[in-house]
Image: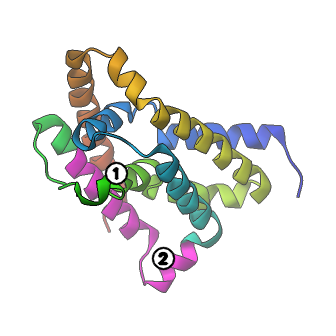
């Protein structure tokens, strides 16, 4: 068990590109507009719990339910597909529970599948084969800090961005999300 800066940097960059929290800003702003706020602490904590669960128990949990990684990836891809349609068409498909002050309503889709979805799970399972666990853990923690900063600054971002800019970004990233979902579906069709 040895810290290796090169491994930590590699894991951090791989997870950063898979999670793509900066690319998710339009989704975050869209949810913030619907819900009124985003609980950055809760989403970061749940995302981190999911990532650590994937790292240490991922394949075992899926095997317990008789689900393979490809099926899990397909389920995540379908959720991303629906979110992409929501963003492009401006229609609400996921009904967000506004009761209970919206505490759980931003968990799906932010914590899962946007932050800690099928791509993150398969990446962590793959990384486990190539890197030491301690370096993967540090890479996860680095990404959780970045996720928290982006989520926490969503109100500031919303104020700084013009409404038209947010709408255009939302449509563009909705299309990108659809493309990612279709790519995941194609890659995991049995």
Q: Is residue 51 above or below residue 26?
A: below
**For the magenta stretch, what is the residue range?**
59-83
Quarter of the picture containing the C terminus is: bottom left
User: What residue lies at 45% left-to-right and 68% top-to-bottom?
Assistant: 69
- Pointer 1 local density, CA inside 10 Å: few below 14, some 14–19, many at least 20: many
Q: Residue 134 carries which label?
A: none
Q: Nearer the viewer, mark 1 or mark 2?
A: 1
Q: Position of residue 14 (x, y in %)?
A: 59, 41
On the image, the x and y values in percent for residue 54 come to 57, 65
Q: Which residue is denoted by mark 1 in the rendering?
A: 106
Pick the residue in front: 7 or 53. Answer: 53
Q: Which of marks 1 and 2 is nearer the N terminus?
A: 2
Instruction: Indicate how the structure is coloured in the image.
Output: rainbow
10 Å neighbourhood of mark 2: few (<14), some, or many (≥20)?
A: some
What's the residue at 38%, 28% (across, down)? 155
Pointer 2 residue: 62
Q: 116 or 130: nearer the eye?
A: 116
Q: Residue 120 location in percent, x, y?
A: 51, 53
Q: Is residue 185 visible?
A: no
Q: Main secondary structure of the magenta part?
A: helix
In this rendering, would 27 be left or right of 94?
A: right
């Amino acid at each position: 068990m040895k810290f290796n800066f090169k491994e930590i940097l590699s894991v951090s960059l791989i997870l950063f590109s898979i999670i793509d929290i900066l690319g998710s800003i339009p989704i975050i702003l869209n949810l913030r507009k619907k819900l009124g706020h985003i609980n950055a602490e809760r989403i970061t904590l749940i995302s981190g719990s999911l990532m650590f669960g994937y790292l240490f128990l991922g394949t075992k949990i899926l095997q317990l339910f008789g689900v393979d990684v490809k099926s899990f990836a397909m389920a995540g891809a379908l959720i991303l597909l629906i979110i992409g349609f929501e963003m492009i068409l401006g229609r609400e498909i996921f009904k967000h529970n506004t009761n209970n002050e919206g505490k759980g309503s931003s968990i799906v889709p932010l914590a899962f599948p946007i932050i800690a979805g099928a791509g993150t799970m398969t990446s962590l399972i793959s990384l486990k084969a190539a890197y030491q666990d301690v370096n993967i853990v540090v890479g996860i923690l680095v990404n959780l800090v970045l996720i928290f900063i982006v989520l926490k600054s969503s109100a500031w971002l919303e104020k700084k961005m013009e409404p038209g800019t947010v709408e255009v970004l939302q449509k563009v990233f909705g299309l990108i999300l659809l493309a990612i979902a279709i790519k995941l579906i194609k890659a995991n069709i049995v």
